[in-house]
Image (tube, rainbow, N blue to C red):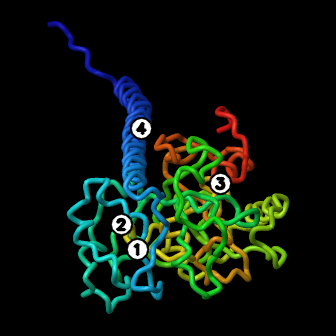
Amino acid sequence: MRNRRAFTLIELLVVIAIIAVLIALLLPAVQAAREAARRAQCVNNLKQLGLATHNYLSSNNVFPAMCIPNFGTYNGYTTAWGASILSGIEGGALYNAFNFSVKLDIGANDFTQPNRTGLVTMINTYACPSESASQWPSSPLYACAPTSYAGNYGGPAVIKGNTGIIVPVTETIQSTGMCLNNSNNASFGVQSVTDGTSNTAMYSEHLWGMSGNPVPRPTRQSPDYKRVYFIPTVDLPSASVDTGNAALALSFVQSCQSLPPTAIPLKGSANGQGLTWAMTAPYFTPNAGYAHFMPPNQASCGYKSSPDGGYGGVWSAMAPSSNHPGGVNICFADGSVKFVKDSVNIQTWWALGSRNLGEVISADAY
């Protein structure tokens, strides 16, 4: 009779080990392919925002403002740029249903207001598919639909404030002490972008804030480290805005980067990022805005004595962030979308944020 030879235990273990190695090699490739697809969708979202903004620009001869006045006041919130460009992203029905003349609020007692339907409507174009948060930053109390994209407030306000493309209008800013009212407020058109629309950022992405305010701030190894945890840092001299002093701005960056991981964030700041696409306030930078102060995916800091109420106003350094490895996608004022690395030179990063400070940027600098 002929003997049949079976697998030995060692042979079986070798086969299992080979299969395990193949799976280990395959999984990163699958994850990379999925992330590439998500990043492509994010780029497409930003391109849609760029096109919608230029449609708005063609109709109104100005870029959309960060926030516009409602009912003669911003007691509470005002309409954000996300609502202004709705008709340009096939949101015409929602735009027509939006009442721009009433005061907005996200308070728990304001669920019956006329714009409640709009506030809770999630818009795919405003959501980056790489966002990994398990719940909206405003839930469960307010349940406002969030945004993954933010308008550029400008470079460091220490040098010159409101130098970006998406900034508040002067009429929105009243005598609260929280807001910056200078010559760079909206409204303006392409003619005011003297640094060139291809060299000036308009929108970037940011991760949603956390629902709640964890203390202390997550460590650098945590996947939530890049989310906004607004931390007050050392005070700069009292003349901390519109000084033209780049050295002063650089010292602020260094102070922010040197904060220990145990630094305590301000109450409320952790859940402000991306709170809602529909509304914001001039002093509430993290919700629908960001600043070209700290490099991408870095800590976000503010002045201890800043009058912005701890919500990251124009005095502060609210950095953009993403789950895309190595940087963030940015839509420029000409509608193009480019990937800017975390390692971008700090002066180049500041220059990309300003529309009218006369910086010269090389095409290969970022």
Type of the residue with mark 3: Ser
Sequence-wise, the earlier of marks 4 and 1 is 4
**How many residues crowd mark 2 within 10 Å: few (<14), some (14–19), many (20+)?**
many
Task: Name the residue furthest bottom.
Answer: 109
Type of the residue with mark 1: Thr
How far across and down, in percent of the image, does residue 36 sit? 41, 37
Mark 2, residue position: 83
User: In the picture shown, does residue 137 fall above or below 353?
Assistant: below
At 81% from the left and 75% from the top, the residue drawn is: 239
Sequence-wise, the earlier of marks 4 and 3 is 4
Disc 4 to disc 1, how far (Cα)? Answer: 33 Å
Q: Do the residues labelled 4 and 1 touch (CB within 8 Å)?
A: no
Mark 1, residue position: 79
How far across and down, in percent of the image, does residue 299 sit? 65, 62
Disc 4 to disc 2, how far (Cα)? Answer: 29 Å
Disc 4 to disc 3, how far (Cα)? Answer: 30 Å
Disc marking residue 36: 4
**How many residues crowd mark 4 within 10 Å: few (<14), some (14–19), many (20+)?**
some
Mark 3, residue position: 354
At 37% from the left and 23% from the top, the residue drawn is: 11
User: In the picture shown, does residue 224 fall above or below 19?
Assistant: below
Type of the residue with mark 2: Ala
Q: Do the residues labelled 2 and 3 touch (CB within 8 Å)?
A: no
Q: Do the residues labelled 2 and 1 touch (CB within 8 Å)?
A: yes
Q: Where, by quadrant of the figure, is residue 149 drawn?
A: bottom left
Q: Locate the N terminus and report the quarter of the image it occupies.
A: top left
Instruction: Describe the element under mark 4 as helix, strand or loop.
Output: helix
Nearer the observer, 296 or 309: 309
Nearer the observer, 127 or 150: 150
Instruction: Describe the element under mark 2 as helix, strand or loop.
Output: helix
